[in-house]
Amino acid sequence: MKETRLYLPSEREDFHAFTPARKVVRDIIFSTDRRDFGWIKENIPCQRACPASTNIPGYIRCIFEERHGRSYELNRFVNILPGVLGRICARPCEPACRHGFPDNGDPVAICHLKRVAADFRPEGHRLQEQLFAPSGKKVAVIGSGPAGLGAAHDLATFGHQVTMYEAEKEPGGMLRYGIPEFRLPRPLLATEIANVLRLGVDLHLGVRVGRDLELAEILDKHDAVILSAGAYRPNRLGMPGENLPGVYTGLEFMMRVNEGERPEIGQKVLVVGAGFTAMDCARSSIRLGAKRVLINLLTTEEFLTVDQEEIFQVKYEGGEFRGLVSIQEVLGKDKVQGARFQRNRLGGWTERGEREGVPIPDSDFFDSADSVILAIGQRPDPSFLHLELDQTERGFLRLNPQTGMTSRNRLFIAGDFGAGASNVISCIGSGRRAAWAVDQYLMRRERRKNVVRFEYMPETLRERKWDFIPRQPMPTLELPNRLAGAGQSEVETGLDPDPAREESKRCYLCYLRFEIDAARCIYCRWCMDVMPKNCIKLAKEVVRHPDGSIQSVVETEDWSQVAAVVIDGKECIRCGNCFRVCPVKCIEIVKVEMMEQDVEA
Amino acid sequence: MAEPLHFVIVGNGPAGNEAAAALRGQDPKARITIISAAATHYLRPEKLAAFLVQPRHRLKDLYIHPYPWYEEQRIQLRLNQTVNRIAPEQKYVYLNHKERVRYDRLLLVTGARPRVPERLASLSSLLTRFATGADALLLKRGIAQVKHMTMLGGDCIALELAQALLPRGVRLTFILDEYRFWPLEFDEGVKKRLADSLEKKGIEVVRDDLAVSVEQAGDELLVKTRGGKEVKTDRACLSSGMVPAVEFLASAGIDTQLGVLVDDHLQTSRPDIWAAGECAQVYYSELKDYRCSTGSVNAEQQGRLVARNMLGAKEMVKLPEPGRVTIAGEHFTTYGWKGFSLDEKD
């Protein structure tokens, strides 16, 4: 018989006789087998999509159990700023969510639930930090944005003495200067930044490296340096009229708004760009009193990087989208009077997976405007380093893939400064990875690693009827309240406890591994009678990934060839029907979680 | 002998029916299927307003083709069935009830539906629509109780409705927003004259304002505008133009923007899939812009043209011929609607 079973951490015959007290000591197993990491990648799509590998089913289950503090901590361990991310995360997890697969409905509101954990964590709840003894090593972090905060947090817990340099007046980087206040309230940001700083991070504000202090000097004084200075050089189109008064770059505009200024924009604003910055510029312009705000896209709304909800909010506030145009020049004498555009048709796809817009010859048109905001992205600016460093073909700094170090010894990179503008969660993940690399370099060994934790579950944790709960909408402020005052009131008001708990039930809990013990299965096929999806299969054999984890199942209808009845983890929606109906209780449920563990010396 | 081709037409409006008839005329052997989400037949939308106020009119009287016509023409008519997905590689359309239908050539003629401004989206259930036969039936059922009606937007459909309702003594309020008189494009002076002439007819006109909320207040609705005006009314009718109904196509990799993006031959970005009528968006070099056609006359023309192209011709779609519209004694030239008039006798 061909081996069709998944790798199991242990064989256990006395499972049904366990008692809760014994469960704690006996039924938790840790593994570093690559097949187990492979299983997580294959079966927990949200966690795989998260650049910080957040244990999403784990924290959503805690919300269901109304353990909001624990849920917050599960987040904070890996993504440092849960309250911030619960509002402004780019949510790569949600398009990956199994609940959003064809015929399964809408993805779980993973991001909104993260905010639930932050909103409802008990007052005075305890932060759990795994602190190493002071190492006596000094590390500098340049930039206090998400990458810098992620790096500083982990460096501090590793016991290193961290000094952080920030050029602006307040810490937070893009979180404070790029993201508008109506998305991210500043007191919350300050609280979560303080949680990092209180670990002993020495923050120097208003110090611009390259102007007030040279990088070479910092390198001399510290054992290692992490550069996380972000991407602050706006992309330019190089078109005529780009420097006229009334033309702003998206980043410059947002920074001025976030510093409390009210830039002159007039009645009609043309925004050029398709990302969150473009949306923020448009929504901020509306709050500054613009009567008409048009977002100009190279392609169409379908190919925007922002989600449908964001598009809806922009339109709700009165913003308009004009698709299939490219800006050719800005026109005006002393200031902007308008812009010339060309119509586009949809072209092919770029290497980066973006749809192209191709201008149609002889399709120019003019549109009047009082100001033009070019929100077409930004790049890192390494000129302030005053150091010769190796670069890649695309103009980014080259890193050693083993150590994460630049071509300069002891100099590491994190976040957007490395590979260009991305998103907050990627930067936090990148910052933490840089900190681990620094620690390994300084201590000459790995001190923390990821392990897979297994825990046998006596029950399914879910009910089949929960699969039909619709996605709970995020309540938002009504239009007049949004625009009132300086327009800084937070637009999304957060899920209430009851809808939040309903939403938490929607998670399939993909970290539960349902598996049929072939030794005990009597091939009655009752499970197949009650399965809601094509999730239980008569298997001839299994196809494995190179790491040994199961990739897919080769099905057969010929009983003489059936090697086993197998639950296909990719189809399984963890409804528990099979477990409840099995007459011989041969279906076992194991909770599989990835976590960080210390490595013994 | 080769199997006859299966032409599947999604949508049961003027473009789809004209295309079906033209396909049958030119290919007697073809299999033709019309799939429509609506339960009602193909009818002329411009007749709906009259139907609404004539108590003895029945919806059946408006049908262009009676049922037996479809049988005679061997066109399979599937009403009340919604297409929710298209798989162009396998050439299947998937219906809501999990059936899949294989096609050789697919025509998308899903038309358009009333635009719901985002600020009113959450109030959608309180709003009246007037675009399809089903909408007209629903409205007709309660029309006797309607003493006052508010038009949110003031497009040409609202003008048609007003034309039918005014003689019946229904009081009307028009809240004119940026979509006023859609799809007709006028300069500001003409728009003002038109608004004046509406007032002369006894219609209350709220200018340069837009409805931001609609609330249930007892038996009535309370419409509030951004300018702070409040209107008590029996019905609040969406009239901010129409938008093509194309959302379900995105997952099929068929390019859409406002409508389905088609080339000069009305072919979409996928092989063997065409689109026509109000859901098809064409680039016209004369206008230096994209345009979705409006009105059933244009849709019928495009339907006949696309049928020929689906059978192998390479005919170019042309900008609709200018038509004439009369509103309040003034004549206007328009690419969109034709033969439409707001005046009682014209």
Image (tube, coloured by chain):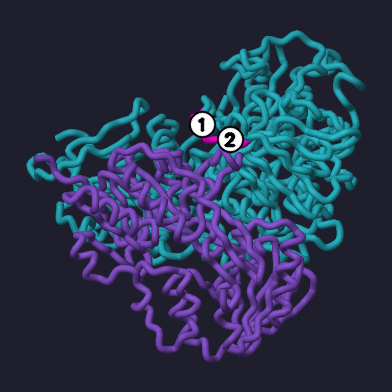
Drawn side of residue A156 relative to residue B242, left or right: right
Give the chain letter for cyan. A
Residue B272 position within the rendered picture, expressed as x and y whole percent measured from the top left: 32, 40
The kind of secondary structure element at disc 2 is strand
Residue at 47% across, 83% down: B140
Residue A243 position within the rendered picture, expressed as x and y whole percent measured from the top left: 84, 29
Give the amino acid at mark 2.
Asn
Residue of label 1: A347
Residue of label 2: A344
Residue at 41% across, 64% down: A468
In the rendered structure, which segment of residues is drawn in magenta? A343-349
- Nearest the eye: B177 or B89: B177
Q: Within 10 angstroms of label 1, few (less than 14), some, or many (20 or more) residues?
A: few
Depicted B308 relative to depicted A415: above or below? below
Residue A351 position within the rendered picture, expressed as x and y whole percent measured from the top left: 52, 25
Residue A66 falls inside the magenta stretch: no
Q: Are marks 1 and 2 on the same chain?
A: yes
